[in-house]
Image (cartoon, helix red, strand yellow):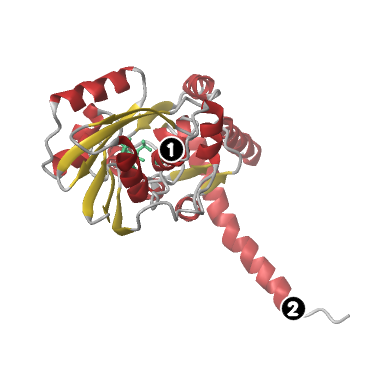
Amino acid sequence: AQMSKAPIQKYADYVSSMFVPAVVLLALLTWVKSIIFDKTGTLTEGHPMVTSVRVFGDINGSEFLKLVASAEAGSEHPLAKAVVAHAAATLSGCEDAEEVKQYAKWNFTDISWLFPAKEFKSLAGRGVCAVVDSKEVLIGNRQLMWDNKIEVCQVAQTFLREVENSASTGILVAADKQLVGAIGISDPLKPEAVEVIWELQRMGIHCMMVTGDNRQTAECIAKAGKVEAIKALQARGDVVAMVGDGVNDSPALVAADVGMAIGVGTDIAVEAADCVLMRNSLEDVITAIDLSRQTFRRIR
Ligand code: ADP
Ligand code: MG
């Protein structure tokens, strides 16, 4: 059969177009000084579970869950999935913890039991807002409430502190500018997380975690906090890698010298990242750096 030259040429172009970025990537990985880890879904399992629900004012429990789930149904955030799963389980009368866990891993396609949400917006590092059941619903952290001048009462403050002291995340819910409830969500660390951080530190790499999660961070980290943290390290001369799952951290994956998307990463994460760790294991961060170091030792 006659072979046309075109595909070969195309292949050569493809290889050379991939080669330079690949070598640059390997070099950058060899020189990486600091690694910034996103928290939710990256250092943690990313399958958080609702552990407590507190309602303020005169809204009843199931009404509250339906309202919250309707607004969160549009979000890809693991916290949102936990809330929708919890609402689905509770409203359908399921109480068994293991069964609720299955709900949480489910991807909800049937959302007919929810109110339709209008004007849904995802607010990076803060939460979500939407118009649900003709109420303006805001769900997220203290910073989100602060931004919208919503008063967080003492009872809610105490609830948040209790939740955070058990290493969980507390989120607040407001409807029409009034705080109506709070939810505690727990997301355990990945089993390999601690070992991997120790090993990276032994390799001389400075490890940090960024999150929009707790009070200190929420207060001082602006909307683009993850990006700013990266730029500050780059300004002092570090080659910076960012490891994230792409939920709310795509700009950070782009800003880093090496953006590493991990695991379940969304399409956006794959586009924003320089490399994608296909398994959901943090050990692959070490593998990637080891591989690049070995490759470079051979080239030299
Ligand atoms: P991280 O991945 O480090 O938790 P994110 O930027 O994804 O950081 O989120 C920061 C914080 O913003 C969360 O801890 C939560 O308080 C709030 N948040 C973000 N998305 C949502 C959401 N869909 N529902 C409720 N709260 C959210
Ligand atoms: Mg995240």
Q: Residues within 10 Å of mark 2 (few under 14, many from 20)?
A: few
Q: Residue furthest right?
A: 1
Residue 82's label in the rendered image is 1
- 24 relative to 174 in the view: left or right: right
Q: Which residue is mark 2?
A: 5
The tag earlier along the polypeptide, 2 or 1, is 2
Mark 2 to mark 1: distance in Å?
54 Å
Residue 256 image label: none
Select label 2 or label 1 by which is in front.
Answer: 1
Q: Position of residue 138 (x, y in %)?
A: 24, 46
Asked whether residue 25 is in view, the answer is yes
Q: Residue 77: give x, y in percent of width and height.
A: 40, 44
| Residue 205 image-quadrant placement | top left
- Residue type at mark 2 is Lys
Question: At x 66% / y 38%, what residue is drawn?
Answer: 298
Residue at 25% across / 23% down in the picture? Answer: 159
* Drawn side of residue 299 relative to residue 137, left or right: right
Question: Where is 225 relative to 95, above or below?
Answer: below
Q: Quadrant of ligand 2?
A: top left
Disc 1 residue lies near ligand 1 with CB under 8 A: no
Residue type, numbered disc 1: Ala
Residue 92 drawn at (x, y percent): 47, 40
**Image height of 148 relative to 212, above or below:** below
Quadrant housing residue 145 = top left
- SS label for mark 1: helix
Query: Which residue is located at x 53 percent, y 27 percent?
Result: 96
Q: Secondary structure at mark 2?
A: loop
Towards the viewer: 85 or 199: 85
Within 8 Å: ligand 2 and the Cβ of disc 2?
Answer: no
Q: Quadrant of the C terminus?
A: top right
